[in-house]
Image: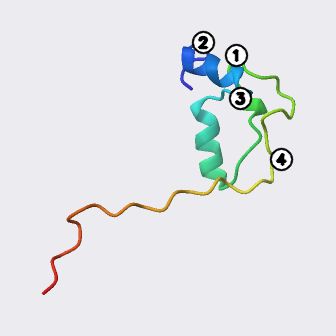
Amino acid sequence: CAFPRTPKAARARQQGGAVVGARWIWECQRRGRRLSCGPYLLDGSASSGSEGEEPEEAPPPSRPSPKKKKGAEPPPM
């Protein structure tokens, strides 16, 4: 989230989610693994306890496979 006090952030907190800033995403990407979100929580989010978090050594979330674009393949000869 860019801002902690938005309807989307409030809805995430109500459903038990943790609201983190973009810095968390970039750090996970840089380190190649999912980090604890505690240090990256935005104001008003869940506590920095373990609720809604995975262990720091958890593997990064799986990425969806790339979708093929229609018309991207050359026509058969």
Q: Residue at image x 56%, y 15%?
A: 7
Residue ID at (18%, 75%): 74
Distance from the alpha carbon under mark 3 to that under mark 4 = 14 Å
For badge 1, the amino acid type reads: Asp
Residue underneath mark 2? 5
44 or 30: nearer the viewer: 44
| Distance from the alpha carbon under mark 4 to that under mark 2 | 27 Å
- Describe the element under mark 4 as helix, strand or loop: loop
Disc 2 packing (10 Å; few <14; some 14–19; many ≥20): some
Identify the disc placed on residue 55: 4
Q: Secondary structure at mark 1?
A: loop
The image quarter containing residue 12 is top right
Q: CA distance from mark 1 to mark 2?
A: 8 Å
Q: Earlier in the sequence, mark 1 or mark 2?
A: 2
Q: Please tell me whether mark 3 or mark 1 is closer to you in this view.
A: 3
Q: Residue furthest bottom?
A: 77
Residue at mark 1 to residue at mark 4: CA–CA distance: 22 Å
Mark-to-mark CA distance, 2 and 3 = 13 Å
Relative image position of residue 15 (x, y in whole percent): 70, 25
Q: Which mark is residue 18?
A: 3
